[in-house]
Amino acid sequence: MVQKPVKTHTFNGVKYEIDIEPIWGVTQDPTPKKYMPVVRVVNGLPFGNRRGARTGLDAIMHEALHAANFNAHEETVERVAREVSKLLWRLGYRRIK
Ligand SMILES: [Zn+2]
């Protein structure tokens, strides 16, 4: 099965552009509503058990949590992303090609 690239995703009723760039993760504030906000995740998001795959899972979880609740405190986002991504990793969830 060929997976289509993910270009957008809706969080909390707001449609975000999903952007893969070779920089750190960032989520834009959706409130200006002048543009489609962006969830930007670090380049690569490695597959399977490759180096950085678990960090990539944590990074996308982190940015998704910001998008779902942009006013959440950074410490809470960091903790929840770490806890949930750790659980998913332990359960065997991995990115596949
Ligand atoms: Zn953050």
Image (cartoon, grey):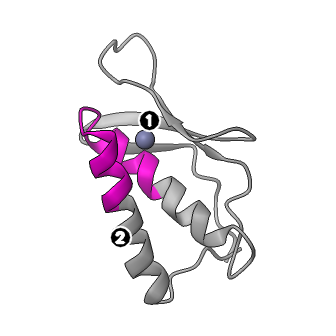
Disc 1 designates what residue?
A: 16
Instruction: Give the residue at mark 2.
Output: 84
Q: Which residues are magenta?
A: 61-80
Give the side of residue 13 with respect to residue 66, left or right.
left
* Ligand 1 under 8 Å from disc 2 Cβ: no
Q: Magenta stretch containing residue 71, yes or no?
A: yes
Judge left or right: residue 56 versus residue 30: right
Relative image position of residue 20 (x, y in whole percent):
67, 44
* Residue 14, position as x, y percentages in the image: 31, 34
Query: Which residue occupies 46% across, 87% down?
Result: 90
Q: Is 48 inside the magenta-drawn segment?
A: no
Image x and y of residue 92, in percent? 50, 89
Dot 1 lies on which element?
A: strand
Mark in front: 1 vs 2: 2
Question: On screen, 65 above or below 50?
Answer: above
Q: Is residue 74 above or below residue 83?
A: above
Q: Quadrant of the C terminus?
A: bottom right
How many labels were placed on the picture? 2
Give the camera-side residue of 8 and 66.
Answer: 66
Tag of residue 29: none
Q: Position of residue 38 (x, y in %)?
A: 50, 31
In the image, what residue occupies the spot 49% across and 81% down? 89
80 versus 25 height, above or below:
below
Q: Residue drawn 60% across and 61% down?
A: 56
Pick whichever of labels 1 and 2 is earlier in the sequence.
1
Left or right: 82, with 52 as reference point: left
Q: Quadrant of the N terminus?
A: bottom right
